[in-house]
Image (spheres, grey):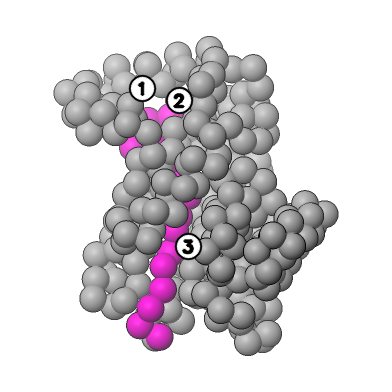
Amino acid sequence: MKNTALITGASSGIGKEFARIHASKGGDLILVARRKELLDSLKEELVQKYNVAVQVIQKDLSVVGSSQELYDTVTQNGWQVHYLFNNAGFGGKGAFLDRDLEADVEMVRLNVMALLKLTHLFGKDMKARGKGKILQTASTAGFLPGPYQNTYFATKAFVVSHTQGLAHELKGSGVTVTALCPGPVATEFAKVAGFGGSKMFDGAASAAKTAQKGYRAMEQGKVICISEFQFTFLIKVLMPFLPQSMTAAIIAKMQQS
């Protein structure tokens, strides 16, 4: 396999679009997600259209030990990962103390722990080779307080901070790490998180355009990519002058709309 990208959460949404972009550039793929039938369908599409090599690995990365199992499978097959897309993740609506605790623990295991472990495992190999690119799917939520979606916002804050610190540590190594930080995107996320019909997702960006912006930022070695201008303006221009309580109140109203 050549120029191989490993993409988690590849069965739908932004992850699926990452796979299409990478295949269109002639890169091979390792597609990872829970729903094998969707991965197999995507594999068939990419092989037929772009004549690339595609491996499918069915894996629930929220399960303890699954990240190590994935790494072991890849290395035992002799596949080198040149691009790592840590894209798998989910959210959940509701006041923190009213939500099922295990659901939020599972969210942390997927959004944070799986990303952390895969970045460490594959990142060490990339650093040893002196070449590689890592793209973390974060969110503009990572810069904001998140009432009524508290744990999700907190997980994305971890991803943003971890990416910024790691990018500095990797300077001069030949390995780059980028955090893609979109606002609302038209994917399955809203339905899974309990936001079906919410006004917050009106006018959501397309997964394809969001993935294109993230992929381009990764190629350029950018550390942070806020994919929509209005959120860049909010986070970099308005937020520094707003009291945190006001920002939290605005987010709370958006979550409940």
Q: Nearer the viewer, residue 194 or 19?
A: 19
Return the residue at label 3: 116
Q: Residue at x 34, y 67 (%)?
A: 176
Residue 30: tell me if it is visible: no
Callout 1–callout 2 Cβ contact below 8 Å: yes
Location of residue 34 in the rendering, given as x and y in whole percent from the top left corner? 74, 55
Q: Amino acid at mark 1?
A: Ala
Q: Nearer the viewer, residue 102 or 61?
A: 61
**Where 49 falls versus 241 (above or below)?**
below
Q: Amino acid at mark 3?
A: Leu
Return the residue at label 1: 248
Residue 72: tell me if it is visible: yes
Q: What SS does tag 1 mark?
A: helix
Location of residue 97 in the rendering, given as x and y in whole percent from the top left corner? 56, 28
Q: Nearer the viewer, residue 10 or 69?
A: 10
Location of residue 159 in the rendering, given as x and y in whole percent from the top left corner? 41, 51
Q: Give the Cα distance between marks 3 and 1.
A: 27 Å
Return the residue at label 2: 147
Location of residue 167 in the rendering, given as x and y in whole percent from the top left corner? 29, 63
